[in-house]
Amino acid sequence: MPRNDLAKPLGYAIALAGMALLLTAQGYSATEPASLQKIEDAFKSGRISYSEKLFDEAKAFFAPQDLPADLKSSTPSIIKSGTALVMQIREQWARFTPSQQAVLSAYLNPPYKQFSYDSPDGYFTIHYDLTGSEAVPPQDGNANGVPDYVERIGQYCDSSRACILGNLGYLPPPIDTTMGGDDKYDVYLESIFGYGMTVPEHPGDSVWNDYTSYIAISCRMDFGIYSNDDPDGDTIGAQKVTCAHEYFHAVQLAYNNNLTEYRWLMEASSTWMEEVAYPEVNDNHNYLPYFFSYPYQKLTSTGTYHEYGAFVWPAYLQLKYGALVLRKTWEACRYNTAAAALDSALAGYGTDVAHTFPEFTIWNYYTGSRAGFEMYYPEAADYPQPAVDQAFATLEHESVHPVTGPDGLGCNYVEFLVDSTARGILDIILDGSDLVRWGMASVASGTAGDTVKTVVSALNENLHIFQPFIEDYDLVVVVPAVVSPYVTGNVYALSCHVLPHGDANYDRVANLADAVYLVAYVFRGGPAPRPMLSSGDANCDGSVNLADAVGIINYVFNGGAEPCAER
């Protein structure tokens, strides 16, 4: 029987509890749904249309005081980045009424600001106010007439640019000199209910779909930012990661302005870029529960912060293959879909998404308390562990079906305790839906260490993983994974069977037929033991010969020791 049939509700509870703790720590009530949740609920119930949903989300980001009374909330709707919302608004522009378009234009057009400041390296102009509703904090420690808040933004934009362009070799964002008047990139400090946003403006001059843009960053960061690990405090940490996150959005627009295809990849890779540029901050850790609590959701999911927590995907790619693989991905995005671009970039390393995804699920398994086995992610101990779909107190099962079937590029984690009587080779079989392509990973854990295996299907075939000497392990975790995109809620049947030592003919018992099989193999050139040569090693001496057949005959007819009893 399953030890935990509440895996799916538990995953939701983990994510909701994480949000509640974050909001409570910041002094907000977590009892009332946030405005964004109220807006989403109104849309799902049919009370508002999609364009009205976007319009209300824009209000929640730019002017929450203007929301209808039933959508207002005392619980903040913290938006990591408004970039995706802005791009959705632009994509759906024709669906808004003239009055809505007027309001949205006021939100999205670069605002007039009282002052400007050029960053130390001269690549950015920071526009800001000293009075009014969008005034920046006035502190000016060096008494040079420019508030410290503004100077820090300039410094962090410069260092982000040096990291992304100088160290990593990305294309610079196209500059619209007709709008800004010079070749500096414009950053506006505004009163927004979020960290920042990058706003596409005009087509660039390349043959692909590049766009000029400007960045807006919160002028105060006083809306309830998440806590982080920056030694100089949460506000400074938020400033740092916002500059890195939004500037990388601007860089992405140098390659492609296609929201529909790239929204999840844009947010996941920008959130990862925070780690690359400012590894001390760890603001992105706040979004990990929205990914790890729902491993069955497709990698490309957007909404409820999933795409921000999915920064572990570009993290995995960069840590596994090097920083160039992500740049190659964005270079391929100029002419390909996101999925094709990832495969194109990985082809240079002799692999593709389908073959890397099962290993990615293993990286995600070794997080939290499991990180001590092997540190896949450098900060794996600080990451949450992925939610388990089912857990069983016994090892052998004929047909296990998922509680929540995985989406395309999603997976389940299924745990099996190893019975004390289990001896031999564990045969794990995945029979998945023919509508998608499948992969499977397994982790066998024991006192002497862990053994990890992965397989990927070629066509619509059952997948097998064989784990020899299962008696050396205490726990087996099997990870069925859909390695093709798009299709949701896929079904499968998972089975686990122990092949006893000496089962040379692969019929799940050790008997006289196996002795006959071995004699034919040793003396007559018959087929080798199945499913692997070691299946016929009945005395576990590392070789397959006549002694194994003799041992089986002695066990069957003379009451001798069972195969490998003295191992």
Image (cartoon, helix red, strand yellow):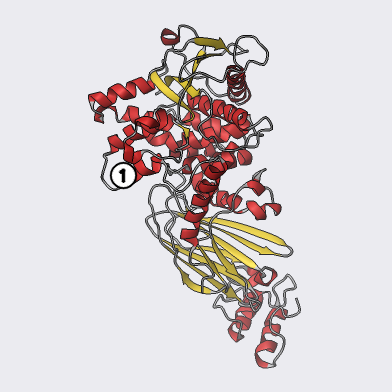
Q: Secondary structure at mark 1?
A: helix
Q: Give the answer, above or below, for where 53 lies relative to 489.
A: above
Quarter of the image where one finds residue 348: top right
In the displayed orientation, state which residue is furthest to the bottom.
Answer: 558
Q: In the rendered structure, which amino acid carries the disc numbered 1? A: Ala
Q: Is residue 43 above or below residue 211?
A: below
The answer to which quarter of the image holds residue 170 is: top right
Residue at 68%, 60% (x, y): give it: 450
Q: Which residue is mark 1?
A: 42
Of residues 536 and 79, the one nearer the viewer is 79
Name the spot of residue 204 as percent of width and height, x first.
41, 17
Whole-percent x and y of residue 285? 58, 42
Q: Position of residue 500 (x, y in %)?
A: 62, 77
**Relative depth, front residue between 346 and 159:** 159
> Which residue corresponds to the image point at 61% horizontal and 86% vertical from the top-left?
512
Q: Between residues 342 and 2, which one lies in front from this camera angle? A: 2
Q: Is residue 320 above or below residue 522?
A: above
Q: Residues within 10 Å of mark 1 (few under 14, many from 20)?
A: some
Which of the image's four quarters has the C terminus? bottom right
Q: Can you name the residue that lies furthest to the top here?
A: 181
Where in the figure is residue 41, as x and y percent of width and height? Answer: 34, 46
Residue 357 visible here:
no
Left or right position of 296 against 107: right
Q: Is residue 387 left or right of residue 552?
A: left
Residue 177 in view in this figure: yes
Total labels: the figure holds 1
Above or below, 416 relative to 225: below
- Which residue is found at the position 47% from the left and 14% from the top? 175
Q: Nearer the viewer, residue 355 or 100?
A: 100
